[in-house]
Image (cartoon, grey):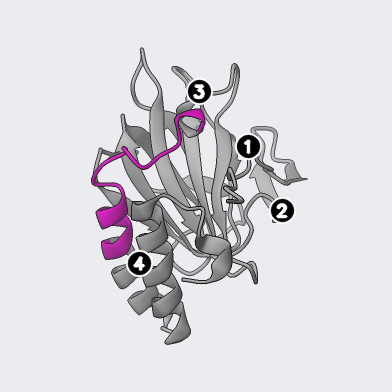
């Protein structure tokens, strides 16, 4: 753990230390996804480490609370909070990512381009339940639409991306066929204890 990690809750600090050690081995993507999934599953086993403000939804869309950013922007750890009825546009990430469900349910509809270059749904929507982890990457499939699968309460997932996702140029695929660039940003940054 480096000196900038001293402010992290114990469970998150252990996750960061283990993920840093994994990344130092320069794993291939399959190894990163497999071992990263095990680490994230361990992190999301409870939510008692999650700062209370990082469990708050926004009024009209999913919000991203930054929990940790690697000093070299190798990855970011984000709490995504979905209010009832909230959904994303179809979008991509452009990097590897792991999504671990802490509370509630996320429903994901993956998309891909057909032979004519048109974006189409791939299979049926999947339901990410509490304690489970999913992965995205340009190689695995990077385009999806996600919504809160619980009608009357927030859903919370911890996302780990191979970049500072809050500053990453990404794409939203609109119903009329247009593609818009966007940067998701963060609604809150980590609280730093300077003692």
Query: Of callouts 4 and 2, which one flags the residue occurring earlier in the amino acid sequence?
Result: 4
Specify start and end residues of the magenta stretch as a single range.
38-53
Marks 2 and 1, how far apart at CA: 13 Å
Marks 4 and 3, how far apart at CA: 27 Å
Considering only vertical position in the picture, is 161 above or below 173?
A: below
Residue drawn at 35 percent across, 62 percent down = 14
Q: Element at badge 1?
A: loop
Marks 1 and 3, how far apart at CA: 19 Å
CB contact under 8 Å: marks 3 and 2: no
Query: Of callouts 3 and 2, which one flags the residue occurring earlier in the amino acid sequence?
Result: 3
Q: Which mark is residue 167?
A: 2
Query: Of callouts 1 and 4, which one flags the residue occurring earlier in the amino acid sequence?
Result: 4
Circle 3 residue: 86
Marks 3 and 2, how far apart at CA: 22 Å
Percent position (x, y) of residue 15?
37, 61
Q: Assess disc 3: are there few (<14), some (14-19) or many (≥20) residues with their C-alpha within 10 Å of its C-alpha.
A: many
Q: Assess disc 2: are there few (<14), some (14-19) or many (≥20) residues with their C-alpha within 10 Å of its C-alpha.
A: few
Find out whether residue 45 is within the magenta segment: yes
Circle 4 residue: 36
Circle 1 residue: 188
User: Is 141 situated left or right of 15 in this image?
Assistant: right
Marks 4 and 2, how far apart at CA: 22 Å
CB contact under 8 Å: marks 4 and 2: no
Query: Of callouts 4 and 3, which one flags the residue occurring earlier in the amino acid sequence?
Result: 4
| Residue 117 lies in quadrant | bottom right
Percent position (x, y) of residue 28?
42, 83
Q: Element at badge 2?
A: loop
Query: Of callouts 1 and 3, which one flags the residue occurring earlier in the amino acid sequence?
Result: 3
Marks 1 and 4, how far apart at CA: 24 Å
């Amino acid at each position: 753990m480096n000196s900038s990690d001293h402010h992290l809750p114990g469970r998150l600090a252990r996750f960061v230390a283990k993920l840093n050690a994994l990344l130092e081995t320069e794993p291939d993507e399959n190894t990163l996804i497999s071992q990263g999934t095990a680490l994230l599953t361990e992190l999301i086993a409870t939510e008692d480490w999650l700062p209370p403000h990082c469990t708050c939804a926004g009024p009209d869309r999913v919000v991203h609370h930054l929990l940790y950013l690697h000093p070299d922007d190798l990855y970011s750890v984000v709490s995504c909070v979905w209010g009832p009825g909230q959904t994303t546009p179809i979008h991509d990430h452009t990097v590897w990512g792991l999504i671990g469900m802490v509370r509630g349910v996320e429903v994901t509809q993956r998309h891909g381009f057909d032979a004519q270059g048109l974006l189409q749904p791939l299979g049926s929507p999947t339901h990410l339940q509490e304690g489970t982890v999913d992965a995205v990457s340009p190689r695995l499939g990077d385009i999806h639409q996600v919504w809160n699968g619980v009608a009357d309460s927030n859903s919370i997932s911890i996302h780990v991306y191979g970049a500072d996702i809050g500053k990453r140029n990404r794409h939203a695929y609109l119903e009329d066929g247009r593609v818009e660039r966007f940067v998701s940003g963060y609604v809150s940054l980590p609280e730093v204890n300077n003692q």
